[in-house]
């Protein structure tokens, strides 16, 4: 039996598995050798908070030439390194440390980044403010991003401040209008027949397939991934080359510039802000959606009673309230601290808020790990067991419901509830 939708473009029905009529003899020729890999790490020490790290990363190995994947991202990383080096020479220092990482062996299973993250795990848990991943930065002109919800506003605001090379509008406007174009006609107008303002463009959930995985899913470091996409038909092939890029992908290379600008803007905002721009109100909204979606799925499968959604939603409401409160306090304290030029008690209070905003994401990690794959510890985000790179939010709960395992669903929901309660507690303590 082939899974539903398992049909490619060739003119015959696709098969899965073998029968006596259909047999495939596959001979593979793979070289098994040990090779040395190199991660290249550059750090600019922060002036005031050396032990708070804003980490930027991109891989350097490619299947073949890799003009898009990963070299468009590497171009942006090197350009950021050059620009920050120039700033450094003029006497500038970021408030927090900025760490630039060029990973090796990403294509073999995220080896370079995973080794580094595992080696530095305890330090990263304490010090990492965020991880900003860029992989295949440019294969066209369509901006898109995936991240934890606490970074949605930060990504959108950076996109507002960078110019889209083709149109001269902001990257944000072009992004929002493109997404708006795909809204069905029936949803364009409100009840009075007036055209609705275009909604903020969606930022997706992080699954896997690039180096943010160990940061987010193993340690709980707030993470993002972003790119300018297009008709990229040459992925992982020998045609992902300079010729393709200079003829089709980005002939003027201006989107490479825009990618570096957005990446750098987000990095500098995280590194320099008095109060960290991580907003958990969006996180609570997203969690509520995930739970409601899961509840609908469970109801369809007549498993609606298999988990305690009331406690889960209550935990999310508490988390949302705490998020709103700390967000207000952060804004007030930033203003006060600016007046006092970050001195004394104001700065100390802001420091506690920042610590809470960093650690709230960490609290969503459960050291016991996900069922059957304990290396993945984040309770909200993971790639699905059967979805390839794609994310399956609330992974253990969703999978248990998909499989009809009611006892596991109940246990998964309890673990998620605990994680959200831990995060709410941290946010609450941060403003005391
Ligand atoms: Zn890649």
Image: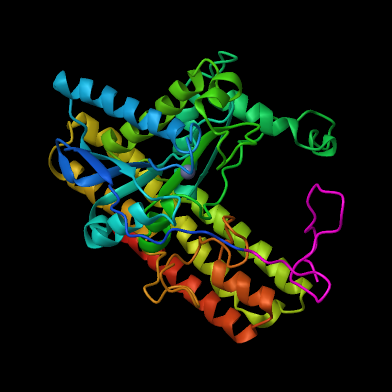
One can see residue 88 in this view: yes
Specify whether residue 37 is painted magenta: no
Residue at (80% x, 38% y) in the render: 187
- Side (left or right) of 169 relative to 34: right
Quadrant position of the N terminus in the picture? bottom right
Q: Position of residue 149 (x, y in %)?
A: 49, 49
Q: Residue furthest bottom?
A: 407
Q: Position of residue 317 (x, y in %)?
A: 52, 62
- Side (left or right) of 9 relative to 177: right
One can see residue 196 in this view: no
Residue 181 is drawn in which quadrant?
top right
Q: Position of residue 61 (x, y in %)?
A: 40, 43
Residue at (63% x, 31% y) in the render: 230
- Taking 249 as reference, is 267 above or below it? below
State whether the magenta stretch is mostly helix, strand or loop.
Answer: loop
Residue 58 is drawn in which quadrant?
top left
Q: Position of residue 39 (x, y in %)?
A: 28, 46
**Span colored in magenta:** 1-26
The residue closer to the viewer here, 18 or 376, is 18
Quadrant position of the C terminus in the picture? bottom left
């Amino acid at each position: 039996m082939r899974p539903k939708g398992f049909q490619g473009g060739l003119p015959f029905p696709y098969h899965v598995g073998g029968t006596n009529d259909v047999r495939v003899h596959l001979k593979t020729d793979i070289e098994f050798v040990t090779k040395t890999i190199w991660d290249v790490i550059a750090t600019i020490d922060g002036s005031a908070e050396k032990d708070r790290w804003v980490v930027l990363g991109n891989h350097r190995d490619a299947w073949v030439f890799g003009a898009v994947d990963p070299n468009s991202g590497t171009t942006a990383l090197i350009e950021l390194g050059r620009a920050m080096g120039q700033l450094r020479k003029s006497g500038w220092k970021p408030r927090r440390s900025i760490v630039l990482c060029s990973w090796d062996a990403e294509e073999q299973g995220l080896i370079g980044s995973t080794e580094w993250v595992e080696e530095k795990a305890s330090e990263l848990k304490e010090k990492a403010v965020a991880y900003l991943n860029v992989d295949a930065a440019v294969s066209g002109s369509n901006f898109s991003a995936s991240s934890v919800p606490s970074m949605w506003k930060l990504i959108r605001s950076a996109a507002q401040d960078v110019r889209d090379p083709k149109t001269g509008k902001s990257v944000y406007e072009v992004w929002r209008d493109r997404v708006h174009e795909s809204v069905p006609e029936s949803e364009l107008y409100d009840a009075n027949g007036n055209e609705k303002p275009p909604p903020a463009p969606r930022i997706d959930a992080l699954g896997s397939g690039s180096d943010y995985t160990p940061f987010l899913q193993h340690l709980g470091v707030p993470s993002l991934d972003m790119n300018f996409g297009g008709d990229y038909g040459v992925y992982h092939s020998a045609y992902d080359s300079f010729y393709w890029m200079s003829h089709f992908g980005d002939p003027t290379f201006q989107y490479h510039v825009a990618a570096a600008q957005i990446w750098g803007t987000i990095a500098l905002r995280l590194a320099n802000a008095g109060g960290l721009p991580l907003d958990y109100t969006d996180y609570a909204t997203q969690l509520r959606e995930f739970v409601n979606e899961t509840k609908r799925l469970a109801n369809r499968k007549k498993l609606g009673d298999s988990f305690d959604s009331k406690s889960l939603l209550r935990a999310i409401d508490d988390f949302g309230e705490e998020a709103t409160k700390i967000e207000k306090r952060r804004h007030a304290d930033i203003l006060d601290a600016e007046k006092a030029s970050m001195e004394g008690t104001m700065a100390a209070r802001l420091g506690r808020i920042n610590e809470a905003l960093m650690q709230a994401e960490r609290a969503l990690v459960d050291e016991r790990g996900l069922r059957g794959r304990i290396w993945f510890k984040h309770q909200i985000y993971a790639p699905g067991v059967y979805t390839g790179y794609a994310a399956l939010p609330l992974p253990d709960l969703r999978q248990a419901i998909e499989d009809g395992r009611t006892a596991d669903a109940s246990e998964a929901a309890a673990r998620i509830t605990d994680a959200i309660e831990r995060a709410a507690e941290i946010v609450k303590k941060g403003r005391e």
